[in-house]
């Protein structure tokens, strides 16, 4: 059993460390620049906050209503030509499309709990009815296990749990005719994914499955990544406990343990791609971004959700290895001299520099740091990605920290930066993060809004657009922006009662998910009462700190000058 030391990391929004009081004695930047930053990100007017609540809701509604008008029942909206998009049946190898789209009204499903959180009860009930009427998973389509799990199964389970909540925190969501149909759909879909697990000799699931026919005898690819194979436990665990069926959680746990067993014994790190059949690493890159990001996230969130100590043991091990081998820059985020902290991509076996780029998915790591209680570190991580957004107007998909330029220039409306912004605001209540959120929202409207939705930015160099609005724009990007500004929302007033999946779906942290209804030889779980919900073991943030920059102005200015941001 782990000591109570580990419990301080959970629900850290109530147990934050006091920020450093002292200023360091080096004068690199002008007082004028520093004073500007203090005023630029100062107290946030209440009237403006309320305006931003409305604008965030308008953003979601504009995307959602146009999807219904121009694309439903297809999976996605093409927001430039105002048409729907489904799988590319003419080109089965087009995995950029076919991994995600499966002829199952994806955007409608993914948006369900955002409708609930925004309090649009009538629209929510209409959407649930449409899902039940139109969605059928008996399709001859090959989809990616990871994407279907987080987008579809996660949305169905989250929405089912919101409907079944007798306290009705978001209004009377339950239609009179509801009889657990969304749970049945989630069960059906999860069962269709099981061949990916059953046909794996290592326990790591195959990356893709045909929803009707399962996995072919000789699959086209047996290559997967830790994020794809190891970000299934939150949804599968909830499903198993709702159904009293250990199979789904069991397979997801087996996958996590298998991935963990193949980590480097020298560094403790994992690579970014692995062969499912042999267990041999194909890609040795180890970092915080694509291929690995949500694996770390789900080890911690699964521990929060289910209380299984083995989940935290794995998370603590990999988190320690990340800091030992990836973190560069000055030791302390908010004091001392040196380069701004940065997590780099390394070789999983040696810990040496693998390449000099970072990707936009890494912006989510600040949110993991918040959940783990490393607020100062989260502040530093977030600041770099925010100023990258500021430098280009939106976030380039991949940026080279050596050449200080984008390597992959598109931006597909990703939510990771706004997710971390939201979590840091919940943790600190610093108005800095409201200013950041406003800037993100305004830039989305300025650069990505089209005649009938929001489009992918093809290049941050000229802000040209691509005709695609992925479903996560409504399930995550819009949701986190709305919640950032809606301080009175039930989620924000009871933040310790919920956790967000990697697709932004809302799950209640409930004692019933700490109890397995089946009997097995299991690792001990931590009772929910043991977590720091009402009695923090760390000092809380001094309220006076909430009205200053979370990252001292000289350090914020340091990043801005390095990136060439003119106002810095």
Image (tube, helix red, strand yellow):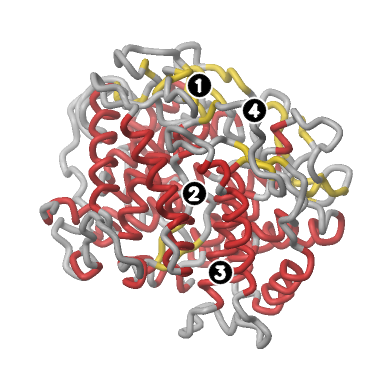
Q: Nearer the viewer, residue 181 or 416?
A: 181
Image location (x, y in percent) of residue 482: 56, 60
Neighbours of disc 4 within 10 Å: few (<14), some (14-19), many (20+): few
Image location (x, y in percent) of residue 308: 27, 55
Mark earlier in primary sequence (3, 2): 3
Mark earlier in primary sequence (4, 1): 4
Residue tagged by mark 3?
A: 117
Say whether residue 271 is visible: yes
Q: For the residue labelled by badge 3, is the local secondary structure a helix, a strand or a loop?
A: helix
- Quarter-of-image position of residue 547: bottom left
Q: Which mark is residue 564?
A: 1
Q: Residue at x 23, y 19 (%)?
A: 266
Question: Which one is in front in this view, the residue at disc 2 or the one at disc 1?
Answer: 2
* In contact (CB < 8 Å): disc 3 and disc 2: no
User: Is 51 placed left or right of 319 in the picture?
Assistant: right
Residue tagged by mark 4?
A: 218
Mark earlier in primary sequence (3, 1): 3
User: Is 232 placed left or right of 270 in the picture?
Assistant: right
In three-dimensional space, the C-alpha distance between marks 4 and 3, rounded to whole angstroms, equals 44 Å
Neighbours of disc 1 within 10 Å: few (<14), some (14-19), many (20+): few
* Vertical comparison of 152 with 364: above or below: below
* In contact (CB < 8 Å): disc 4 and disc 3: no
* In contact (CB < 8 Å): disc 2 and disc 1: no
Q: Quadrant of the N terminus?
A: bottom left
In three-dimensional space, the C-alpha distance between marks 4 and 1, rounded to whole angstroms, equals 51 Å
Most distant residue in the front direction: 217
């Amino acid at each position: 059993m782990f000591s109570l030391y580990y419990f301080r990391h959970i629900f850290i929004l109530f147990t934050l460390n006091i920020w450093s009081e002292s200023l360091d004695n080096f004068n690199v930047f002008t007082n004028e620049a520093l004073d500007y930053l203090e005023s630029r990100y100062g107290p946030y007017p209440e009237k403006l906050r309320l305006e931003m609540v409305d604008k965030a809701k308008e953003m979601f509604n504009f995307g959602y209503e146009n999807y219904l008008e121009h694309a439903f029942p297809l999976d996605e909206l093409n927001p430039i030509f105002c048409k729907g998009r489904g799988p590319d049946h003419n080109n089965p190898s087009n995995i950029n499309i076919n991994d995600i789209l499966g002829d199952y009204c994806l955007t409608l499903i993914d948006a369900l709990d955002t409708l609930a959180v925004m309090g649009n009860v009538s629209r929510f009930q209409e959407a649930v009815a449409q899902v039940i009427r139109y969605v059928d998973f008996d399709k001859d389509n090959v989809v990616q296990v990871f994407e279907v799990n987080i987008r579809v199964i996660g949305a169905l389970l989250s929405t089912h749990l919101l409907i079944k909540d007798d306290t009705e925190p978001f209004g009377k969501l339950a239609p009179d005719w509801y009889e657990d149909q969304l749970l049945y759909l989630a069960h059906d879909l999860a069962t269709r994914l099981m061949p990916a697990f059953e046909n794996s000799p290592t326990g790591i699931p195959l990356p893709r499955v045909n929803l009707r026919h399962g996995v072919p005898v000789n699959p086209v690819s047996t290559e997967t990544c830790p994020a794809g194979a190891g970000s299934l436990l939150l949804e599968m665990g909830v499903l198993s406990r709702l159904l009293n069926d250990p199979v789904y959680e069991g397979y997801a746990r087996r996958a996590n343990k298998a991935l963990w067993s193949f980590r480097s014994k020298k560094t403790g790190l994992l690579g970014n791609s692995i062969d499912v059949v042999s267990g041999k690493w194909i890609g040795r890159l180890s970092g915080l971004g694509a291929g690995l990001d949500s694996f770390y996230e789900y080890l911690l969130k699964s521990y929060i959700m289910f209380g299984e100590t083995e989940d935290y043991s794995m998370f603590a091990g990999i988190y320690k290895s990340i800091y030992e081998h990836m973190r560069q820059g000055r030791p302390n985020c908010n004091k001392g001299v040196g380069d701004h902290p940065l997590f780099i991509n390394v070789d999983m076996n040696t810990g040496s520099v693998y390449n000099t780029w970072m990707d936009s998915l890494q912006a989510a790591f600040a949110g993991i740091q918040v959940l783990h209680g490393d607020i100062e570190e989260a502040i530093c991580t977030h600041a770099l990605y925010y100023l990258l957004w500021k430098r280009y107007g939106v976030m380039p998909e991949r940026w080279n920290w050596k050449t200080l330029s984008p390597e992959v220039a598109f931006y597909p409306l990703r939510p990771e930066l706004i997710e971390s912004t939201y979590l840091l605001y919940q943790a600190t209540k610093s108005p800095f993060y409201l200013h950041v959120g406003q800037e993100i929202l305004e830039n989305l409207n300025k650069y990505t809004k089209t005649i009938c939705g929001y489009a992918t930015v093809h290049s941050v160099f000229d802000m040209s657009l691509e005709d695609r609005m992925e479903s996560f724009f409504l399930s995550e990007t819009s949701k986190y922006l709305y919640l950032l500004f809606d301080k009175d929302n039930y989620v924000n007033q009871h933040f310790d009662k919920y956790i967000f999946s990697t697709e932004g779906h809302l799950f209640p942290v409930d004692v019933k998910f700490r109890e397995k209804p089946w009997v097995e030889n299991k690792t001990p779980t931590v009772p929910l009462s043991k977590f720091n919900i009402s009695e923090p073991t760390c000092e809380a943030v001094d309220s006076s700190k909430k009205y200053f920059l979370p990252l001292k102005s000289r350090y914020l200015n340091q990043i801005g000058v390095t990136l060439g941001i003119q106002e810095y």
